[in-house]
Image (spheres, rainbow, N blue to C red):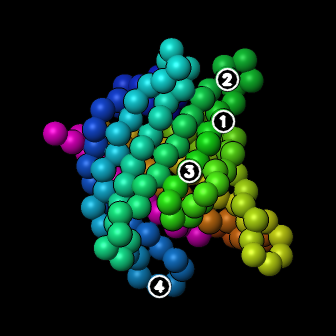
Amino acid sequence: MSLETIFELEGQWAGNYKLWFSPTEPHLESETTAGIKRGVNFTCAKIAYDWVYEEKKQEGLIICAFNPNRELVRAAFFDSFHMANDFMECEGSARDGEINVMGSYTAPVGPSWYWRTILDAPDGAFRMRMFNIHPDGTEDIAVEAVYSRGE
């Protein structure tokens, strides 16, 4: 997936949002919507999405930009649940049909943790997966949202 591919996904999407707090516990599910829009003269893509947790609407925003000279994707990740009142800077790549970016966040105690976001478009759908990465490098699925075209 590249930024051009995200531009092809521009529009409204609806789907299913799964949230894991622990890989050993069942996930929570809710409905979700997403809107993908190009921005700043086609130099970035904005992905705005929402879901519900404990009957309260949550919102997220990812802004992606691709630097073709460095083959680098940079993203800013904001949301009302994981990153309330702040944003996470992420960097990564766009290859093999996906955008894969990672950033870090400060844990309440101990070393920083990491957060990986993977965006892809399998079989005409739009999918967003997020992984929590422990300081030791272990990755756990945290979010999987799968969207189809909204009306």
> Looking at the image, is 89 positioned above or below residue 36?
below
Task: Identify the amino acid type marked 1.
Answer: Arg
Residue at 83% of width from left, 76% of height from top? 110
Mark 2 lies on residue:
67
Numbered tag placed on residue 74 in the rendering: 1
Task: Identify the amino acid type marked 4.
Answer: Glu
Question: Do residues under tags 4 and 1 come within 8 Å of each other at their CB atoms?
Answer: no
Question: Do residues under tags 1 and 3 come within 8 Å of each other at their CB atoms?
Answer: no
Q: Indicate whether residue 45 is drawn in magenta.
A: no
Marks 2 and 4, how far apart at CA: 39 Å
Chief secondary structure of the magenta portion: strand
Name the secondary structure under disc 1.
strand
* Depth order, front residue of 122/101: 101
Nearer to us of marks 4 and 1 is: 1
Name the secondary structure under disc 2.
strand
Mark 4 lies on residue:
25
Numbered tag placed on residue 78 in the rendering: 3
Marks 2 and 1, how far apart at CA: 8 Å
- The magenta region covers 140-151
> Looking at the image, is 131 positioned above or below residue 148?
below
Q: Residue furthest bottom?
A: 25
Marks 4 and 3, how far apart at CA: 25 Å
* Few, some or many residues within 10 Å of mark 1 (<14, 14–19, 20+): many
